[in-house]
Amino acid sequence: MDSSMIGKIEKAMFYAREPERIHFDKFVAVVQGDHKPHWVSYDHGHWTCDCKFFYGHGVCSHIMTLERILGSSVTPADVSYTMDSGIIGKIEKAIMYAQERERISFESFEASIQGDHKEHKVHYNQGVWSCDCSYFHSRGVCSHVMAFERLLMDAVETAEAIPVPA
């Protein structure tokens, strides 16, 4: 491993510890519910889920799970609901799902990350990464992508670095 890659790994760890640097614009994710997978989408603050509970309440355990995992990187679902046993059950499920990270997989996303000098755009689609920084274009991976890999854990495929010629 060359010294430039070591520096990028260190920077990625630093970025991942500061989630306020990260902002998701759009994504599609799958949350494995108790009975079947559910597709959740997010587009500039607007959430949708394919589950029945979402259509009746505007929020569900699948959305709440992603809100817990992504924190300040997303805008919370804009809902007003009555705190009843149905909602309480969904909150409890969301807490459980967020702890069981293997339930989550991201299909695609568009996001930005504030680097040390400027903001960078990162894209992910079906396991293929891209970043607008020059290091990514030469190596196929960068500190910005690695920060997202750390944040999203096993919910995304790992970027493959282009080896440096000997």
Image: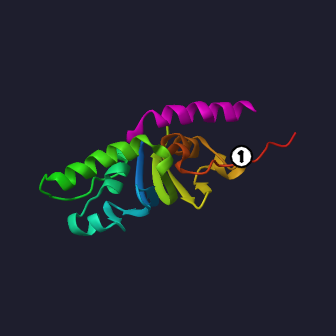
Residue 5: x, y in percent? 68, 35
Q: In the image, what residue type sits under mark 1? A: Ala
Quarter of the picture containing the N terminus is: top right
For disc 1, the marked residue is 161
Left or right of 1 in this view: 67: left
Residue 160 covered by magenta stretch: no
Q: Is residue 96 above or below residue 24?
A: above
Q: Which residues are magenta?
A: 1-20
Identify the residue at horizontal 59%, vertical 50% (top origin): 133
Left or right of 35 in this view: 88: left
**Count of numbered marks:** 1
Give the prevailing secondary structure in the magenta stretch: helix
Residue 111: x, y in percent? 46, 54
Identify the residue at horizontal 58%, vertical 42% (top origin): 146
The quadrant where residue 51 appears = bottom left
* Residue 73 visible in the current orientation: yes
Mark 1 surroundings within 10 Å by alpha-carbon count, few (fewer than 14), some (14 through 19), many (20 or more) = few
Residue 16: x, y in percent? 48, 37
Direction front: furthest residue: 35
Quarter of the picture containing the C terminus is: top right
SS category of the residue bearing label 1: loop
Residue 132: x, y in percent? 57, 54
